[in-house]
Amino acid sequence: MESEDDMHDANEVASVEEEDDYYSGGEEEEEDMDEEGGAEDDYDYSYDYGDEEDDDTGDYDFIANYSDDGDDVLASRSQKNYTILKEEDIQQRQEEDITKISTVLSIPREAACILLRRYNWSVNNVHEEWFADEERVRKAVGILEKPLVKTTNFKEATCLICFENYPCDSLRSAACAHLFCDACWKAYISTSINDGPGCLMLRCPDPSCGAAVGHDMINKLAPEEDKEKYRRYLLRSYVEDSRKIKWCPAPGCDSAVEYVVGSGSYDVTCSCLYSFCWNCTEEAHRPVDCETVAKWVLKNSAESENMNWILANSKPCPKCKRPIEKNQGCMHMTCTPPCKFEFCWLCLGSWSDHGERTGGFYACNRYEAAKQEGVYDEAERRREMAKNSLERYTHYYERWASNQSSRQKALADLHQMQSIHLEKLSEVQSQPESQLKFIIEAWQQIVECRRVLKWTYAYGYYLPEHEHTKKQFFEYLQGEAEAGLERLHQCAEKELMNYLNSDGPSKDFNDFRTKLAGLTSVTRNYFENLVRALENGLSDVDSQAVCNKMSSKNVAGSSKAKGGRGKGSSKTSTSVRNTDDSGNWACDQCTYVNVRSVSTCHMCHHRR
């Protein structure tokens, strides 16, 4: 029999199986696509280029359909495989779970809360354990049916901590009936709360007793400040003990994210607009896996590259072994105080043994002779290896950091466009803001692509050097995607300014709309291909090699049949190269992916 939690998870997984991730690119969805829809329909940002067979009305259809269908398309794209939980949502869920356990097991809410806390707030686990062995569970969590100490009818009793006598109505106890005075209880509770979240598992002060102390006792005796701390600990435990909910790691954000485990990409975006990986809680890094990201982050913060730099660019002083960098001048080196040892940079020998006979200030005959004998081979080899390693790391890191800064700039530009420029552009071009959403979507595409491109450099750094074919294929995809992104960024950043700063409506604004929307779509296609390839481990390289061999055989056979190199063989080769598995074809001129039913590129009107 399936548990309630498992059935809930199964329903959530089923509800998201038909959804597309930002870069889904799944083969199953592509196979089921309608021939007229094309691969780009899954990522439609409410752009409708009209009927391919009627070029004259395309722009007007685009404008009309943009406003009519935009809301429906964006609503379908907003479906996610995760849920953002505010503090009040978490508290509501917590109360609902406590009520459910209290009702089903017929126990007080305080006991239900203790049970759920013990079993990591899993209603299903509580049910299973309780009905399997209720007595064992009660003993384990400290929920007692009968007091451990027999109550007396005396008017006074002794506090078991301070050993003072008090009237019985001034003493309190947990379910075990061990009596303590209010002052001792307050000190015990306050100390436990200030020690941290361990207060959620508070037990009777008697060392031999395991009776649980619930939040009712806390509410009666603790000061307001400690009550609030206890409430925060209890609320946070609901998230931190769950395997399906995690806090947003953004500074100052109090939201949590509930993720449907096993539903696809781990990249999520909180209500504070911070995107992160739900699995490792680093910033969003799809298509690079969490292991690669962890290695890259560690490498950026570790001292290994500092040591490589020191090894590649400095030599140790022969006397005190302090590393010294030579950035200019002659070979005469003087170590810093208090050492002040003078030596030759090349052979590391004492400078007192050098002079005109050894080559002067800018050469060293001793070093050259020793080098020919192989004396410095090992040291030079290690220094050269460190230098090459440092140069390779610097190459990838600089590009990684550059795309990070470009993304931050694009985020700032996006915010400025949303808050200031969009309203101004609407007034200047006499266009409603609802028909200018294509600009916002272009900037959102730029921001997302910068993030993806940034992490591809971490992927490239850890790509094995000996896999030359995969490396070439990766660099090709990365280069194509980067070039497409630069074209889109140029159009959105600079060309848009011409229309924003114009004195009145521009006649060619609709042409700009079509161009920017088209570049957004093309860039999205580039990055879909890049993400899909990296997530598949560049496995397309092997299948592509097989296809190329088969294609070359077919071309060779066609050439032989026609008696030499003819147009037929060239056409066959082009067709194989520009057509994908579903029959859609990429334009040779602008690389836009068109459906197979058309013969003219919808973007640039170049014939196939």
Image: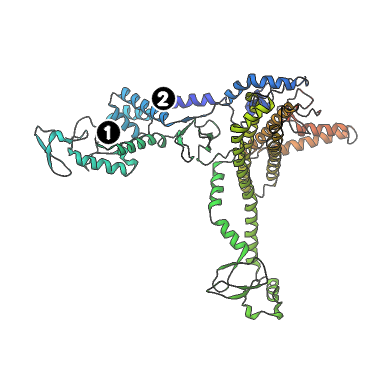
Camera-side residue: 20 or 446? Answer: 446
Q: Residue at x 22, y 40 (%)?
A: 185
Above or below residue 29? Residue 283 is below
Q: Is residue 302 left or right of residue 460?
A: left
Q: From what the image shows, is residue 405 above or below residue 87?
A: below
Residue 4 — which label?
2
Query: From the image, which quarter does the C terminus lie in?
Result: top right
Q: Amino acid at mark 1?
A: Asn
Position in image of residue 366 (x %, y %): 68, 76
Q: Nearer the viewer, residue 531 or 233?
A: 233
Residue nearer the viewer, 548 or 440: 440
Spatial CA distance of label 2 from label 1 is 32 Å
Give the number of the mark in front: 2 or 1. 1
Residue beneath disc 1: 219
Circle 1 sits in a helix, a strand or a loop, which is it? Answer: helix
Q: Residue 436, image x and y in percent?
A: 65, 27
Q: Residues within 10 Å of mark 1 (few under 14, many from 20)?
A: some
Amino acid of disc 2: Glu
> Residue 575 is drawn in which quadrant?
top right
Q: Which of the 4 quarters of the picture holds residue 291?
A: top right
Q: Quadrant of the N terminus?
A: top left
Q: Quadrant of residue 136?
A: top left
Tell me which label, 2 or 1, sits earlier in the chain.
2
The image position of residue 415, as x and y in percent, is 59, 35
